[in-house]
Each structure stands twice: as structure tokens, then as C-alpha cells.
Amino acid sequence: MASFAKLNNNNIVLRVESVVNDVLKDTNGIEQESIGIEFLKNLYNEPDAIWKQTSYNTNMGVHALGKTPFRKNHASTGYIYDPQRDAFIPPKPFNSWVLNEFTCNWETPIAYPNDGQKYNWNEETQSWTLQTI
């Protein structure tokens, strides 16, 4: 199955749909994103809809099966498609977090403690707070 993200005019993902891979094949049997996009536009009778293919197997710039990563992350509702990076980026969780250009995911300005305990990010203090039960 191939996955496609429907975008609004601000490149925010509205939803993700699956399409059978055979639908994407051209006359030479090669999968083409453009064929999947046309299929979805026709299926939903939305000729002006914006669709981008996304890979279920790609997360944080790595393909789970060792293949070439595709658009950095599998799209989800609320993600943003960045055309300059050709990447899907999750919503920014906190103002202080910075975008990792390789993974296109947000990272804290301070590394997560590596002591086996669980922490929550505290935006007000810009630090990790020990999680209490």
C-alpha cells in the first residue's frame, strides 16, 4: 500500500489515505506518485486537491527497511509539508525546541537525561522534570 497526505493551502496535512500499489503503476509497471494523486483527485471528485505521497516506512530521515528515506517522516494529520526540504514535519511541541535538519523532527535544547528515569519537558524552566507517579 502507498500512503498519500492531503494538504490544505498552507501545506498542513488534513488526512492520510492508502492506495493499492498497483493503482500507481504506469504502462511500464513503474509506480508513479502523479498517478496516485490523479486517482485520489478523481476518487473524491476534488480536482484542485493537493496530495503528496508519504512513506509508512520512513521516520526521522531513516527508512525502516534500509531503502532510501522518503520525505523524512510518514505524514500524519497536523504535520506540515515543507516544499524546500521536501519533508513532512510534525507540529512543533514547544517554542524552545529546534528542528533537526536531518531528521526533520523537533529536539529539545537540552538532551534527555540518560539515567533510566522518566522525565517530562518543562518549557517554563527549559529543563527536564522528573516524572512523578
Image (cartoon, rainbow, N blue to C red):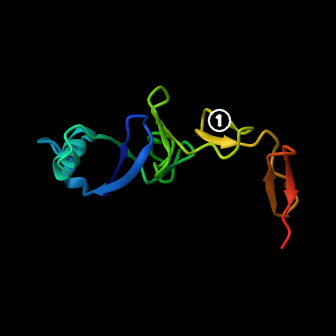
Q: How many labels does the image show?
A: 1
What residue sits 86% from the left and 69% below the top?
Answer: 132
Residue 84 in the image, given as x and y percentages of width and height: 47, 25
* Residue drawn 43% across the image and 45% down it: 13
Identity of the residue furthest to the top in this view: 84
Q: Which of 105 and 131 is in front in this view?
A: 131
Q: Can you say which quadrant of the picture contains the N terminus?
A: bottom left
Q: What residue type is labelled 1?
A: Leu
Please provide percent x and percent y for residue 120.
Answer: 79, 57
Which residue is at a point 58% across and 38% down the rendered structure image?
A: 104
Q: Position of residue 19 (x, y in %)?
A: 27, 55
Q: Furthest-bottom residue in view?
A: 133
- 114 sits to left or right of 29: right
**As displayed, is residue 57 above or below residue 61?**
below
How far across and how far down the image is residue 36, in percent?
A: 24, 46
**Apparent side of residue 89 relative to residue 19 in the rendered image (left or right):** right
